[in-house]
């Protein structure tokens, strides 16, 4: 799912892999720092370093690990994508896994849910974000943080909040788009039988919703811990902000739940309507079969070759039979209409 | 969903936006106060201010914020509708989100659930209600409070109770109406196959119930916290009142749950009945096909052009065949009746 | 749903409304007391008053309130029926809502669940029961209590227990009757397709079960609190009795759950059987259609008017064709039997 | 469900009712004791009495109650069967209800689940088991206990464990048998449409599973309390044994859950397959109807009596028509085969 | 399910049964030790013994029990397979049951889930693993541990971690394979009606998923206890490793849950599509029946033998009728196409 340029030349790759690495003090960017000096900046009183990496290789991660003294297991997790969202505490530092979501735009995955992954290391004096896969860039987050020094002054925990907020915000448009598809499907359903392609679309949607649920629901516990428990680097005054993220996460999860319900209703309604349609068709079939059997049966009788069939010799036998057929068929037709079969 | 007049002229808008703003003392309204002086009144011993706003713009909310020292995040929430019901505590003040419900009456949304939103700020000396969207006016609440000074004397927490009580009360008629539709649908179902429009109505109802559930169920936790925990401005003697609201909320949620169950039963029963009806039609179709095949087959035989068919020359061959056909068909008919296919 | 005589004349109504009002001491009835003196008796050391009311008007309830100092909110609840079962503590007194159940016997509601409502006020020296709607009389409870002075000596908490026990006991026969209907339905189902009336009966049963569940399940929490927590007027030695009621309530709730499951199974089984029956009918239809098409097709061929059809001139052409038809039809019939279509 | 001989003669009944009554000391049976002396033996230091009763009458139970000072409510419960499994603590004694299970072997209830009931009173110096209904005898438990004095030395709590272990063990074969029936059903399902009798069997199984669940699941809490809480007569060193029973109970409950799931899957699969079969039959029906309609239609045309129909006078008109019919039917047949309808 | 060679000759069996038995010190293997000396090595300061057994007989287990003083109940459990995953604490030692999973490769169980079982005894100075059934060998675990002395230095708790990690890792490929089958099934479903064999495959998958769930879900509690509680032999610094296993277990359980959901969606979609297909077929059947009934009916009319049928004598009566038939059939055909029935 990742279509990043592979790091062929060492110089080129480094430029791609390290998206940004800067030191901040009192809410303002004070310097762009190389990884090798990041640890020193992080240890400087009142400063913190914010590094953004994009699918780093092991060597780079090891360097980062050494600069900030990250825990072995956290670094190992960060090397492999496909973690579930979580918050691990290692001594005085945090390791967080977040999953980003967007809808595919390329012809191949058009409308399909594309999940990315972001790992966040945060400790005293540093925040490191590691992006994997289809996750969008965090440059806007950095830009927005740098434009509000008043808030960025809070330090590392505000950056962590800003990243989480950004990730959770990206679920909104995805859910809106999904809701629109479901609404459209419902409208279709009540007018006509859905096509195979439409049923497939809805089926895919259900799977995508389930995948999104797995990406979003573990955040409930993550936020709850950030808001309620004493955690390293998280100041008490930042808690309302994390509660805000949590509110958002709860809302996202409730929306997912509702969409699941709606899809489930849609399938049930679809079955009820299909049964009704089948019933209609069968009745109509039965009614026409009955009506059309009349001329065949009557004509069959007068097609018999008996010598003694007086009607055959009547002057108006033929028109009489035609009239008889018309009357019987007409009567049947009216009766079927009346009972709603036609 | 909001059809409020947009605030074009500043004067006109202010009149619309500030529905009421009054100071109370000892359960009685003592003065109508401009926003700019609300903070001073709120700080006066034994007084509190109750302000009602209708979709205020940012400037007005900022003024209110400054008067009472509201928290930034709460004000931000109040600017955007579409919050989920919740109760946030900021220092010594409360921020509450409530969702109101009514059934649409206009041709476009006839019978559809219309959800509105109300935000309540409450702290020492003030209560501010902010209405969004289809929410009905709180004038009746104010009138009722002012008519019972004995209770209003409790102060801010009584006003908060009165608003909550009013909001929760409005769910009742909505649920009754929904229950009536479901009952009607069930009666229909057992008599005849439902029409597309009826199925659509029920499908909509399921979605509306799910939306109502999302509006009402978070109130359980809100009420529970108001009743059980030590919260700012909530006096212990007001707790039985909040427990009363909670009882009501529980009842509303149970009713929603039951209606969901009933709708689910209705769909299942509908499937069972559709299968039974399909079976009936198919059997009847089969029976008539068999009966009508008899004259066709017999007549076909005597329509053959063989030279040597003695029956053709019999004097009473023709009537004999007619009788034969009548007897076979009659016998079949009686047999099908007996086994319940006709 | 209530068919009580409406209290037209004040005297008549009082007689109907106050079912009984007596003071007890040491497990024995010592006096019938008017409401106006009830408070005095309740305050007498070692005595308690037990009053039974039937749909009292507001004036009477207010008098009771004044005698025992009941809480405003509890009295308000008692004026309106349709509360959910609950236990509220107000200072040193309890307010309890119970829902009674029985099956309707009148032609109109034959077999339908009829829910009644009882409110119980209990505090030091008094127990007041207030009946609403279809609830049966508590005279048998009073009679049984008075016949076991050894137990009634416990006082107010024993009376509360006796009333609860009586209410919970009345669920048993209702559930048994419902179980019998479900069993009968299952037997029917496996023999033949159920009629509309039978499906309707089952559908009603599901709704009634849901209503009964809502009446019975809140009692779990009520009993649990009575057994486990320190509550006013409830002595520790009465706890095993409340645990007994709780056991009973748990059993009732489990039975309700099982019956719901059984009904759900019944619907699923019904769908499976309907599909099987439909399949059978369609196969049979197909088989007979095939068999009957044979004579029609063959006879049709020999009904053609070609000049040169040698068979038509054969001496035994006609019987040969009849034999051919019989052989083909017979073969088809045997084959269809063999594969189980006929 | 009980088919025990009813106790007509007092002497005969006593013999049947008291299955065994013995005193134990240091893990060995020291004496058979009459009920009337049981209390004395129970009070002897280092001794305990183990009594087994089979559906005792009230008089006998009262005697036992007096000997050991059992609680009134526990004795009342023991008189009536149909309790749910539970563990009640009365002072320093325990009252336990267990439900036994086996599959019926008689023609009437062949393969049906038969539930029995056992009540256990245990206190310092005594254990009394009371069997109701189809419960199997506990003689094997007594025999096994007496054969391992090393364990029986633990005293009353070991006997209670042994009885529980025996009851829980009896669920295993029942579940295995049920699993075998479900497996068989699944195999059948994939080969052919199930018969009515088979559907009935599965439906019964679902009900029996639900009944078994109600018998087994309350044991989870019973075991959990025996293992974790300080209870009268239960020594700390017996706790691993109760944990062992609990493991077993958890396993039984998980198996029940899995079987429920499997049955549910089976019903769903059954519906999918029924729909597929119905589809097959309808297609085949449609295909043959189309093929057989060809000769009828063509022959009908040449059976018309127009004066001027040149084909009728052709030398090879008749065989040409036969060939035409054969070709059209053959083409249709091949085409239907190709698209899988035949 | 076990296909191990049965231990006929005592010498041969011992070789097979004791897979490995070695003593470790400071992260390095220091000696291969016979069982009879294992206890002595375990008691040596700084050393621990790691023994791997394969389906040992009772005698061998008894020897191991004596060497390390294992608890009777744990040993009894280890003799019988078919335990559920659990963690029992006996004094200062742990007993753990794990279930391994792989997909069968033999023709008989191709693609079916094969569950094995491993029991782990761990106490001060020893770890004993006992394999049952289809469980794969733990030689790779031992090799990997011995290759990282830095970690193995942790001692017994690291070995326990390594075994758990290995077991949980083996669930991954199983789930991936299952997911692939489900994906394939979904693709099939949207193209054509699934075959019986495919439906059977999916049905089996559902059962296997349920079995895997029962194997994996109890590990959640096991890991949680290892990570959070003070347990014998588990050092605090090993806790992050157990948390890592727990993360993995949570992920596995979520995947199982998602696959269950996907299968459930697949069944529902399958029903919707089957209904749609059935509808299509019935409509097509009805349309063709109507079209083919036209020539039969018209030809029947002109096959009647009335003396006075003017059309029969027209010069172009015959072609006129043919044209009439063609026009009517063509019109019907176009109309059916337009409404989507053909």
Image (cartoon, coloured by chain):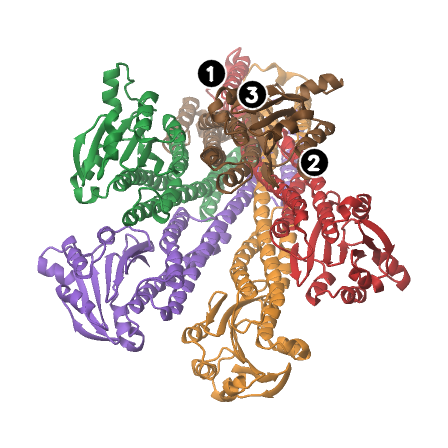
Chain colours: A brown, B green, C purple, D orange, E red
**Which mark is drawn over residue D275?**
none
- Which subunit holds the residue at mark 3? A
Q: Position of residue E263 (x, y in %)?
A: 60, 39
* Foreground disc of the pair 1, 3: 3
Q: Position of residue B122 (x, y in %)?
A: 31, 36
| Residue A334 is at least partly visible in this image | yes
Q: Which residue is mark 1?
A: E310
Quarter holding the C terminus of chain C is top right
Check disc 3: other Cα within 10 Å, few if <14, some if 14-19, many if 20+. some
Of the image marks 2 and 3, the number of the one nearer the N terminus:
3
B289 vs A295, nearest the viewer: B289
Q: Let me know if marks 1 and 2 both belong to one chain.
A: no
Q: Position of residue D300 (x, y in %)?
A: 57, 24
Q: Which residue is mark 3?
A: A29
**Which mark is drawn over residue A76?**
2
Helix, strand or loop for disc 1:
helix
Check disc 2: other Cα within 10 Å, few if <14, some if 14-19, many if 20+. few
């Amino acid at each position: 799912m990742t279509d990043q340029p592979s790091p062929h030349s060492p110089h080129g790759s480094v430029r791609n892999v390290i998206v940004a690495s800067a030191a901040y003090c009192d809410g303002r960017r004070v310097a762009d720092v190389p990884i090798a000096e990041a640890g020193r900046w992080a240890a400087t009183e009142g400063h913190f370093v914010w590094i953004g990496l994009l699918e780093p290789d092991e060597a780079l991660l090891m360097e980062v690990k050494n600069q900030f003294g990250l825990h072995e297991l956290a670094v190992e997790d960060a090397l492999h994508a496909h973690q579930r969202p979580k918050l691990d505490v290692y001594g005085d530092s945090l390791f967080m896994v977040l999953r980003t979501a967007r809808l595919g735009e390329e012809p191949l995955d058009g409308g399909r849910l594309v999940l990315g992954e972001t790992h966040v290391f945060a400790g005293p004096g540093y925040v490191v974000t590691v992006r994997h896969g289809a996750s969008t860039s965090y440059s806007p987050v950095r830009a927005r943080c740098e434009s509000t020094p008043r808030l960025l002054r809070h330090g590392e925990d505000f950056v962590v909040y800003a990243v989480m907020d950004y990730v959770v915000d990206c679920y909104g448009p995805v859910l809106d788009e999904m809701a629109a598809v479901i609404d459209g499907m419902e409208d279709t359903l009540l007018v006509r039988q859905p096509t195979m392609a439409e049923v497939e679309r809805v089926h895919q949607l259900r799977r995508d919703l389930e995948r999104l649920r797995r990406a979003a629901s573990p955040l409930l516990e993550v936020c709850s811990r950030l808001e309620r428990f004493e955690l390293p680097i998280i100041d008490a005054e930042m808690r309302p902000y994390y509660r805000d993220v949590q509110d958002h996460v709860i809302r996202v999860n409730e929306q997912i739940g509702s969409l699941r319900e709606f899809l489930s209703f849609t399938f049930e309604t679809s079955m009820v309507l299909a049964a009704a349609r089948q019933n209609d068709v069968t009745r109509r079939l039965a009614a026409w079969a009955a009506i059309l059997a009349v001329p065949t049966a009557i004509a069959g009788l007068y097609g018999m070759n008996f010598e003694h069939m007086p009607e055959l010799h009547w002057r108006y036998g033929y028109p009489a039979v035609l009239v008889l057929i018309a009357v019987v068929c007409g009567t049947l037709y009216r009766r079927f209409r009346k009972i709603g079969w036609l």
